[in-house]
Amino acid sequence: MTGRKVLISGAGIAGPTLAYWLYRRGFEPVIVERAPRFRAGGYILDFWGVGYTVADEMGLLPTLREHGYVIDSLRYLKADGRVRAALNADAVRRAFDGRFVSIRRGDLARAIYDLVDGKVEVIFGDAVTALRRDDHGVDVTFERAGERRFDLIVGCDGLHSAVRRLAFGRQERFERYLGYFTGSFASRGYPHREPGSYVSYTAPGRQISRYALRDELSAFFFVWRRPHKLTFDPHDVDAQKRLLGEAFAADEWLERAEIFARLGAADELYFDAVSQIQMPSWSSGRITLVGDAASCPSLLAGEGSSLAMAGAYILAGELARAGGAHGAAFAAYERCFRPFIEAKQRAARRFAGSFAPKTELGLFLRDQLLKLMNVPGLGDWMLRRFAADRFQLPRYPS
């Protein structure tokens, strides 16, 4: 076995998944994470498809069901609170044969991380700042720790990947902005709680959603259309709150004022552009990328975490199959997974507009489509046609 010592940048979804499969196959993974500690919480996501199969192989399903949420309905409201369209979530579960769970991103990440905690080295509060490659390895400079040498480097550090920037170039070369911005935060004690319902108010070009979490928490999710990408300081939360307030200032929804009052008091806010990453190659020498760092389908695709887990599983399997020979393994990983990912990216670009249709006519058509999905048989076919994964995960020796 060659190329056994692997540095993984990022302790979100893809990184710990990759560390788990590499460790099981005789490699020595090390994870570095910029955050000072493991990050919990986060927005709720729907988890299904190829990643669900990987989670099953990892023995995670009981934990995911324990921490997950059963969403009974998706409801779109008018400004006065009346329902304009709704979808019974049983249709979604039927379309995926029950292999579907709604869960907070942090709870999914924690379940994966717990499988490697204490087994692999994890460095919190640090980051990669320089990579120096030669024929036999990569010398890594860290922000705080001393320089170390690894056989391989894998960037699992998301849309704004530091490894991608250092090894491949500036993000602007690979980012495709989809014309939307998004934000999310959580607040305790919100008075309008409807456990089991995902509730949204949509006006042309923007949408506010809410859903009830455990411990009296409610989470809020914003999407709005902005044709030209704006520049913002990722560390200035107050400025991000102002941008959200301006984007939704014209909304007449009766809950708007209360939601934005709570946003003003929130300590944490997720805020970012809705973008994809499109690269001619995911690998360069001894360095490769997984998950959003390589091929972000965009948050609105709804399947980023699942695809990240599948990519990590395939990369680890191909490295084991190639005996650590990175050139052959990286090429096989990309040959196997890239066509599927590119199809997912195309689907996400087509689907993005349904989150915040640009016109009243677009809203009307979205509502009619949602109502059709409630029709037995027809709805199951539509959901399978639009969202089911048509990809068979490869099998690798234990």
Image (spheres, rainbow, N blue to C red):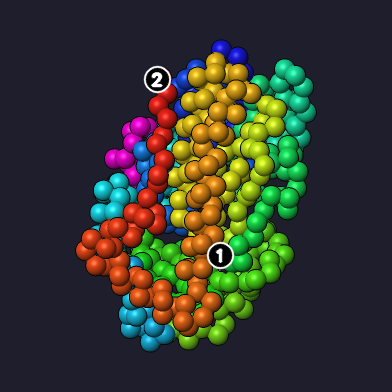
The mark tally for this picture is 2
Name the residue beneath numbered marker 2. 398
Please tell me which residue is depicted at 55% across the width and 28% down the height of the picture. Answer: 332
Could you tell me the amino acid type at mark 2? Ser
User: Percent from the top left, x then y, of residue 380?
Assistant: 28, 58
Please tell me which residue is depicted at 68% across the width and 26% down the height of the picture. Answer: 286
Please tell me which residue is depicted at 30% across the width and 72% down the height of the picture. Answer: 371
Name the residue beneath numbered marker 1. 182
Residue 76: which quarter of the image?
A: bottom left
For residue 230, say whether it is visible: yes
SS class, disc 1: strand
User: Percent from the top left, x then y, of residue 184?
Assistant: 51, 63
Of the 4 image quadrants, the one containing the N terminus is top right
User: Percent from the top left, x then y, of residue 237?
Assistant: 63, 64
What segment carries the magenta color?
56-68
Does residue 325 belong to the magenta stretch? Answer: no
